[in-house]
Amino acid sequence: MVLSIAGEGRNTWRDLWLHLPQEGNWINAARLRRLQTGQEQNQPCGPTAALSAAAQAMNQALKAAIILIEHVDYQSTTVLERRLPKNRRSVDLLEDID
């Protein structure tokens, strides 16, 4: 659902927030996943681990940005190619009036 709305290059676990019936607040899907698998205790403890986690998050964000840029570039190229004369029917061309 998230990929169809936001497009490729998105991490659905980070973008999706859930409101469970037994909870009063919304919870991020990634955090809920970590809680259910027991990985919530493995959060960075020191500055080195925190910087490593931040660098990994930045790396994922940059990869997502690159995918979005490639998608926009592809879309702009294909739209331009559809407008080229070789792809037009002869009945679509207007005659020059002198």
Image: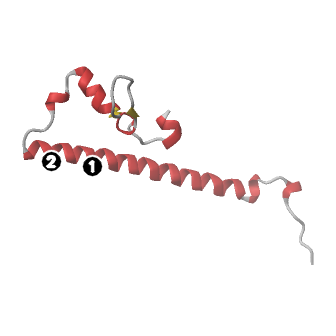
Q: Residues within 10 Å of mark 2 (few under 14, many from 20)?
A: few
Mark 2 residue type = Leu
> Toward the viewer: 78 or 64?
64
Residue 46, picture quadrant: top left
Q: Residue 47: horizontal and vertical position, in percent?
A: 8, 47
- For the point 14% across and 44% down, the residue is 50
Mark 1 residue type = Met
Q: CA distance from mark 2 to mark 1?
A: 10 Å
Element marked by disc 2? helix
- Side of 87 relative to 53 (left or right): right
Residue at the spot of label 1:
58
- Side of 88 relative to 36 (left or right): right
Mark 2 touches mark 1? (CB < 8 Å): no
> Toward the viewer: 83 or 10?
10
Picture colour scheme? secondary structure
> Toward the viewer: 74 or 29?
29
Above or below, 69 against 17 in this view is below
Residue at the spot of label 2:
51
Element marked by disc 1? helix
- For the point 76% across and 59% down, the residue is 85
Q: Residue 73: horizontal and vertical position, in percent?
A: 52, 54
Above or below, 54 against 97 in this view is above
Mark 2 vs 1, N-terminal side: 2
Q: Which residue is outermost to the right?
A: 98
In the picture, the disc for residue 42 is none
- Side of 85 relative to 81 (left or right): right
Residue 32, picture quadrant: top left
